[in-house]
Image (cartoon, rainbow, N blue to C red):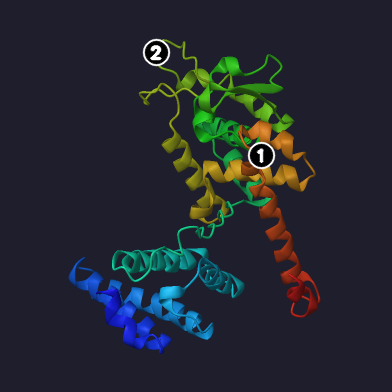
Amino acid sequence: MKQGSSQSHAKDPKLVLSRYAEAFLEMLSVERGASPKTVESYRSDLTTFEKFVAKRGEETSKTSTETVRGFMASMGNVGMAPTTMSRRLSALRQFFAFLVAEGIRNDDPTASVESPRRGRPLPKVLSEADVGKLLACARAVKGPRGVRLVALVELLYATGLRVSELVGLPVGALARDRSVVTVRGKGGKERMVPLSLPAQEAIEAWLPVRPQFMANDKNSPWLFPSKSAKEGHLTRGMFALQLKELAVDAGLSVSAVSPHVLRHAFASHLLAHDADLRSVQQMLGHADISTTQIYTHVLDERLKSLVRNFHPLANGLANNAL
């Protein structure tokens, strides 16, 4: 497609835009072998953009970066998902690259337009009552396995350790009075995390039972040893499976319970009880406090949910304010 072939249509921007778009779509189909479904997806995105440009009385060959940004802003203003906005911007980038390659314009107006940020999904969090149900079910498990399960859940909920940190804890990580555990996290960095009284009591009950889970040498360095695991200690997968079984017993959704969800519960419950964000960051072992701040968003959403569900004006003014 040559630049000169469109000059006769310069007075009709809608026609010019449509012809440019059709040429681009033809190129996708013929030269790139795009499927009909893919071509139709591009057609839909470009049609939306063409309508926006036409309302501004502009031509595609003269569309500015400001217009592209305006188009992106218009989508954001109506609450369009970032994924959809990113897809449309990607279509525009390819479209304008085609126009530049064909000599229709000399620059790409999308070059300096940033893709919309995709919001980080809020982590799943169990309520304090749900954690209580898990612990109650763990205590109902008879024998040494139950004692170990209580110690694992209490320790995880008390510290917010990553599951790999939890199952790989050496006995020496515990302070003599069991009030603190020293954790070696990512990058070999160590941090000290205080233990709650229930966690301390659960560990004290576990230690006398611990030798039953060791191999014959009885000299395992791990806090939660395992005779069968090649690592010498309880594996992440086995603990995750045990949590799933607890979830079933507790009447909770299996998909909503995992070691990482308990880590989330530790953080969000601390913040709900006015814990300092920086302290929670240190206990979690986050290098950047922005990672920890996601839990404040969880609390915000829960508060909004409470208002929507229980406030007497939830269907009126209060709901609109949120």
Residue 318 screen position, x and y as percent = 78, 74
Classify 3 as above or below 207: below
Residue 155 screen position, x and y as percent = 62, 32
Residue placed under numbered mark 2 in the picture: 216
Classify 114 as above or below 26: above
Residue placed under numbered mark 1 in the picture: 289
| Res 270 visible | yes
Q: Quadrant of residue 60?
A: bottom left
| Res 135 visible | no
Q: Depth-wise, is mark 2 or mark 1 nearer the camera?
A: 1
Classify 270 as above or below 219: below
Specify the amino acid type for callout 2: Asn
Are there few (<14), some (14-19), or many (20+) residues within 10 Å of tag 2? few
User: Which label's residue is closer to the chain start, 2 or 1?
Assistant: 2
Are there few (<14), some (14-19), or many (20+) residues within 10 Å of tag 1? some
The reply, left or right, for residue 270 in relation to residue 91 is right
Element class at badge 1: helix
Residue contact between numbered discs 2 and 1, judged by CB atoms under 8 Å? no
Name which residue lies at 73% across and 42% down.
270
Name which residue lies at 43% across and 31% down.
235
Name which residue lies at 38% across and 69% down.
105
The reply, left or right, for residue 216 in relation to residue 303 is left
Residue 257 screen position, x and y as percent = 53, 49
The reply, left or right, for residue 34 in relation to residue 91 is left
Q: Quadrant of residue 273?
A: top right
Specify the amino acid type for callout 1: Ile
Quadrant in which the C terminus appears: bottom right
Q: Whole-Å distance between the Cαs marked 2 and 1?
A: 45 Å
Q: Quadrant of residue 22?
A: bottom left
Classify 242 as above or below 33: above
